[in-house]
Image (cartoon, rainbow, N blue to C red):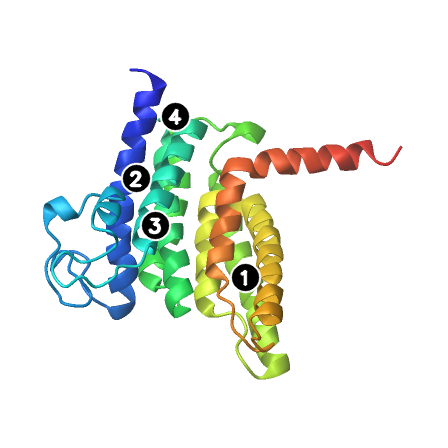
Amino acid sequence: MPEAIYLVVVFIIGACIGSFLNVCIYRLPEHLSVVTPGSRCPSCSAPVRSFDNIPIISYFILGGRCRSCKATFSVRYAMVELLVALLGAALYWRFAFAPEFFAYAAFTVALATVAFIDLDHKIIPNVISLPGIVVGFGIACLFGFVLPAGGAEALYPSVIDAAIGVVLGGGFLFLISFGYYVLTGREGLGFGDVKLLAMIGAFVGWKGVLFTIFTGSVAGAVIGVFIMTFRGKGAKYAVPFGPFLSMGALLYIFFGRSIISWYLSLIMIGPN
């Protein structure tokens, strides 16, 4: 089958998964079932009909409104579906249907859910991060038994790398969070971020954790300064860190190894 057809199939499946993630993003913080009842309008509670529940397309067919009460739906529903679809296609382009594709697809779904929940509620549900640590490390163990070690070219961390990633990720943010609380008397980073970075470490190993911390911190600082400067928010305004950690982890999956190799080559060459 031509590669383009595989990409289209993965894109469609990703859009469908993104549609389900919209349910998770809305219901998990409210401690509601993500299975029942079916999708409903948040305004009038009318069930969304199956032909109105086509990912991405239905939003534009309905003009972003409920068919029953005409209440406006946020465009973010379609954006989440499109984002997950594009990430799925990008993962296929990067890994094809190698085992890493399925491992990182599950990881990407978890990161996307966490990022949007943290944006809305400034929380990271334990129901995602804690099982994610176990799943990420379990996959490393499974790959260690089933697949031969790939050395520097391995696309998924070894068991040791994953274990160090969990400890380094969770321990690093825990120390920062605890130290900030001791110095200021208020919470800076939430423990949800600690568990999220431990989950990230399980999936990308210790190098991925360092890359994620650096890129996430830089992006978070830039956005935080922008918000405080142009939106008039005070210095105590809490910028959710989960989306930036998620972004850093995704960047590592696609580009991290290349960026690290490029950087190391610059260090080895040194100034002329």
Pinpoint residue 262: horizontal percent, then vertical percent.
68, 33
Q: For the residues carrying marks 3 and 1, which lies nearer the camera in this image?
A: 3
Q: Nearer the viewer, residue 3 or 208?
A: 3
Precedes in sequence: disc 2 or disc 3: 2
| Disc 1 element | helix
Location of residue 97 (image quadrant)? top left
Q: Residue at x 56, y 67 (%)?
A: 227
Q: Which quadrant is the N terminus positioned in?
A: top left
Q: Is residue 40 left or right of residue 147?
A: left
**Label 1 sits on residue:** 171
Q: For the residues carrying marks 1 and 2, which lies nearer the camera in this image?
A: 2
The answer to whether the residues at label 3 and label 1 have Cβ atoms under 8 Å apart is: no
Pinpoint residue 190: horizontal percent, then vertical percent.
48, 70
**Label 4 sits on residue:** 96
Pinpoint residue 42: horizontal percent, then vertical percent.
20, 65
| Disc 4 element | loop
Up-down relation of residue 138 to residue 91 (above or below): below
Q: For the residues carrying marks 4 and 2, which lies nearer the camera in this image?
A: 2
Q: CA distance from mark 2 to mark 3?
A: 10 Å
Q: Amino acid at mark 2?
A: Gly
Q: Amino acid at mark 1?
A: Gly
Q: Residue at x 24, y 44 (%)?
A: 55
Q: Amino acid at mark 3?
A: Val
